[in-house]
Amino acid sequence: MTLTDQSTRIREGEELDAAIIDSYLKAHIPGLEGSPRISQFPGGASNLTYLLEYPNQEFVLRRPPFGHKAKSAHDMGREFRILNQLNAGFPYCPKAYVHCTDESVIGAEFYVMERVKGMILRADLPADMKLDEAQARALCLNFIDKLVELHNVDYKACGLSDLGKPEGYVQRQIAGWSDRYEKALTPDAPTWEPIKAWLQDKMPSDHHKPAIVHNDYRFDNVILDPANPMKIIGVLDWELTTIGDPLMDLGNTLAYWIEAKDPAPVQLMRRQPSHLPGMLTRQEFADYYAERAGLPRIDNLDFYYTYGLFRLAGIVQQIYYRYFHGQTQDKRFAQFIHMNKLLEQMSLQVINQSRL
């Protein structure tokens, strides 16, 4: 079966100097032979990800995007540390080899990790991959099980107690994303004021058991075994990981979860095959999560889902801000303003339904 995480030609303006990369890596990683062939993974809208192919070994290089970056975002050292320490309790993190803090090397901090070969699902299944309803359900349940497993990791045993402050986490997320959204506002963007007020009013207490929060858990950040596509062998993209409320992490994941019955405009935003027959609905997803996590049914799911939508809008708007001000030429981002407006409409619908 074809690997779906294939790299392509590097986008204009995002090139790397192979000779500089080669010299740096050979000074820090023993046993490298030949010169690297560098290509770029086309997915993702935040950090830039490149494939480095040596004759005897393959690596993945991650660096921040070009242009304006939100404060505290794109912390390469943080992600490097998480990969190395969390692996002891969650063995699906790729091994990280080297973290470069000298921005003069390529113009930014970066780190290099192993390449875990496997399948990464995008909006639709690859042409040579077929899942019947039972297989799709099995994959969906395994996907949720991995999230529960992550939330059960003993982060103190991994030496990650200082990764975040669980006390006051819910309040900080609402306040923090409200502030980040305002700072990224453009004249054509919605204000989200009614939704921010509703989130503030409905804010629950922090979860009684803090957990590792991935903050971007979705299908295109997990790697599947090509020999058994229902098996997850890797989890990627740890840049936003912290310690906090696991139900907020659930809300983040549900914000990406487009159901088969969602309206056509929402389907256009789908970036994972969550619509397939056999995949759970958002409510079923949350119910199964609660069952596996040993929790009662989540009766305020509307809060966590709406928070996830608002946070996603904040991420989208931060990226669109860079495009709007000419700090990136990536034309994919021109449509992000429409995504932001759609996310606002979805949030208002959830809120209105909760008032019935």
Image: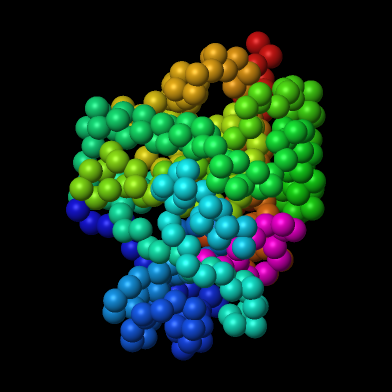
Q: Is residue 81 visible?
A: yes
Residue drawn at the location 65% of the way across and 36% of the way down = 244
Does the stretch in magenta take in 220? no
Task: Please indicate whether residue 23 sits to the left or right of residue 316 in the image.
Answer: left
Rendered-image quadrant of the C terminus? top right
Residue drawn at the location 43% of the way across and 56% of the way down = 94
Q: Position of residue 257 (x, y in %)?
A: 48, 35
Q: Position of residue 224 (x, y in %)?
A: 32, 47
Residue drawn at the location 72% of the way across and 40% of the way down = 165
Task: Please indicate whether residue 32 sits to the left or right of residue 166 in the image.
Answer: left
Q: Position of residue 117 (x, y in %)?
A: 31, 58
Residue drawn at the location 74% of the way across and 47% of the way down = 181
- Give, as a single range, the part of the protein colored magenta: 62-76
Q: Residue furthest top?
A: 356
**Up/down of 170 relative to 286, above or below:** below
Q: Residue furthest front?
A: 157
Q: Nearer the viewer, residue 240 or 265?
A: 240
